[in-house]
Image: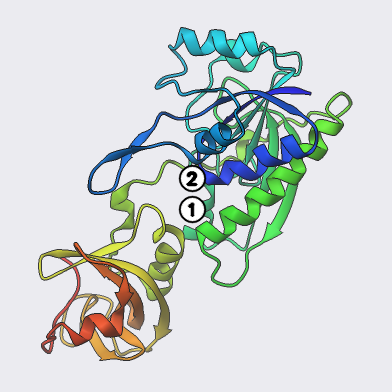
Amino acid sequence: MKTVFFGSPAAALPALEALLAAGHTVELVVTQPDKPAGRGRRLVPSAVKTFAAERRIPVVTPAKIRTDEDARERIVAAGPDINVVVAYGQIIPHAVHFFPPHHSMNVHFSLLPKYRGAAPVQWTVLNGDAESGVTIIELSDRMDEGDILARERVFLAPRETASALEARLAGIGARLLVSTLARIDGIPRIKQDDSLATLAPKIRKEDGRIVWFETAAAIDRRVLALADRPGVFTIFRGKRLNIVRGHPVVTAGAVPSSPGPGPGPGTILAVGKAGLAVACGAGTAYVVEELQPEGKGTMSAHAFSLGTEFAPGDSFGE
């Protein structure tokens, strides 16, 4: 089957590879434009663009696919039987997603209609859900509201990070995509129940800020969900400190959940080889195991403590 593939991040690569391995042809890849990264703000291509270039698959990178007529003409000229969309990053207009004979198919990393939106995996971990999954839908004009073609449910592993879950779902989605394409002519369409819909909006950098009045369990979920992207951080002595890894501990009654006598949330309780124990809300504590000081590389919290003088009552936060 002739396809045009829409995708951008590394999570889209298993699906693209699976299409090729199953004997489908990818006539054209549509991906996001190169983006500045690093201190030098050097333009870096998407993972999908890099892969396509290595395989000599033609690529277009419209900044706004809704208004880019040249890109639309390239897509139509490719003559696909179906468009395949995996984590592309833009809303595809009706004129593009509807014209192939089999229209367009989207691989979404949640059990739709739950978590419609740009960041379903991160919100799954942030909210502490026990399960997730992959849904294959037929693209419609409304975001993630198309008819369901296939779905597969998975349970989260204990303390699974969003990055690890996304990688797992990407592999499942690739397999489910190929099996769905194999029976595309006779597959039933199932309407989504809009009354069950929830949203997974794009994660902002500010969503990574730790609020120490939250419980240690909530802070742990934030680190598991966002440490890899866009990053989880607190402020220490006026500078940003990224929290890379840690774990919650419960110290019942030892930490007040509101300001007052005793170690308030954000107070550094203990410093040692295990890391930095920090008071959180509701009498809990969180141990920071690995961190990244502003302008420096990632290091263990113990190594950071050896080069930092801590005074009684020092705390993280504004």
**How far apart in space, not on screen, are marks 2 and 1 (Cα)?**
6 Å
Name the spot of residue 238 as percent of width and height, x first. Answer: 10, 65
Helix, strand or loop for disc 1 = helix
**Tags 2 and 1 in contact by the CB under 8 Å rule?**
yes
Q: Is residue 294 above or below residue 248?
A: above
The answer to which quarter of the image holds residue 130 is bottom right
Name the spot of residue 218 as percent of width and height, x first. Answer: 41, 68
Q: Is residue 181 above or below residue 28?
A: below
Residue at screen point 43% across, 73% down: 217
Residue count near mark 1 (Cα–Cα under 10 Å), binned few <14, some 14–19, many ≥20: many
Residue 277 seen in this snapshot: no
Label for residue 122? 1
Q: Is residue 301 left or right of residue 227?
A: left
Q: Is residue 144 above or below residue 215?
A: above
Residue 313 seen in this snapshot: yes
Helix, strand or loop for disc 2 = loop
Quadrant location of the N terminus in the rendered image? top right
Q: Is residue 256 left or right of residue 170?
A: left
Residue at screen point 80% across, 32% down: 23
| Nearer to me, 297 or 204 | 297
Q: Which residue is mark 2?
A: 119
| Nearer to me, 236 or 63 | 63
